[in-house]
Image (cartoon, rainbow, N blue to C red):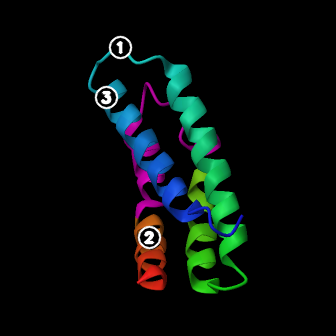
Amino acid sequence: MADIPWTILACLAYTANICIGTVSLRGRRVPRSWHGRVFLVALALTAIAAATSFPEHPVRGAALMVALAPLLALPFVGRPVRRRPSTHIGIGLVAAPCFAIALLLWAASVL
C-alpha cells in the first residue's frame, strides 16, 4: 500500500475537479454529477494520502490535512454556486498551495 503514490493521485483528482469546474463555468455542457463525483474522489484520495504520509513524511501529511479543511467546508460555505461562483472558486483554490507543497515534498522524497 505504501508503493501507491497517493499524493500524486490526490493532486490529479484535485486538478481534474478544477478542470471540470472550469469547463462547466465556461458554459460547456458537463454533467454536474461529474464535478460532484470527482470532488468526492479527490476528497477521499487526499484523506488517504494524508493518512499514509504521516509515519514517514509528517510535513507532507500536514500539508494534505490543511488542504482537506477548505475542501470539507466547500459544500457548505461555497453555496449557492450559481449566484456567487467566486466564493466557491475562492474556497476551492485555497487548497491549491497545499497540494503544490505536498507534491513538491513527494518529489523531493522520491529523488
How dense is the environment of label 3, judged by Cα within 10 Å: few (below 14), some, or many (20 and up)?
few
In this view of the protein, which residue sits in the foreground, 14 or 85? 14
Q: Spatial distance from mark 3 to mark 2, Cα to Cα?
A: 24 Å
In the image, what residue type sits under mark 1? Arg
Q: Secondary structure at mark 2?
A: helix
Figure check: 1 above or below 13: below
Magenta-tinted stretch:
74-96
Q: Secondary structure at mark 3?
A: helix
Query: Residue at left 35%, top 38%?
Result: 19
Figure check: 22 above or below 45: above
Which quadrant of the rendered structure holds the N terminus? bottom right
| Residue 80 appearing in the image | no
Q: Spatial distance from mark 1 to mark 2, Cα to Cα?
A: 31 Å
In the image, what residue type sits under mark 2? Leu
Q: Quadrant of residue 17?
A: top left
* Residue wearing tag 2: 103
Whether label 3 touches label 1, CB < 8 Å: no
**Disc on the earlier residue, 3 or 2:** 3
- Image coords of residue 98 (percent x, y): 47, 69
Which quadrant of the rendered structure holds the C terminus? bottom left
**Disc on the earlier residue, 1 or 2:** 1
**Disc on the earlier residue, 3 or 1:** 3
Query: Residue at left 47%, top 16%?
Result: 31
* Residue wearing tag 3: 23
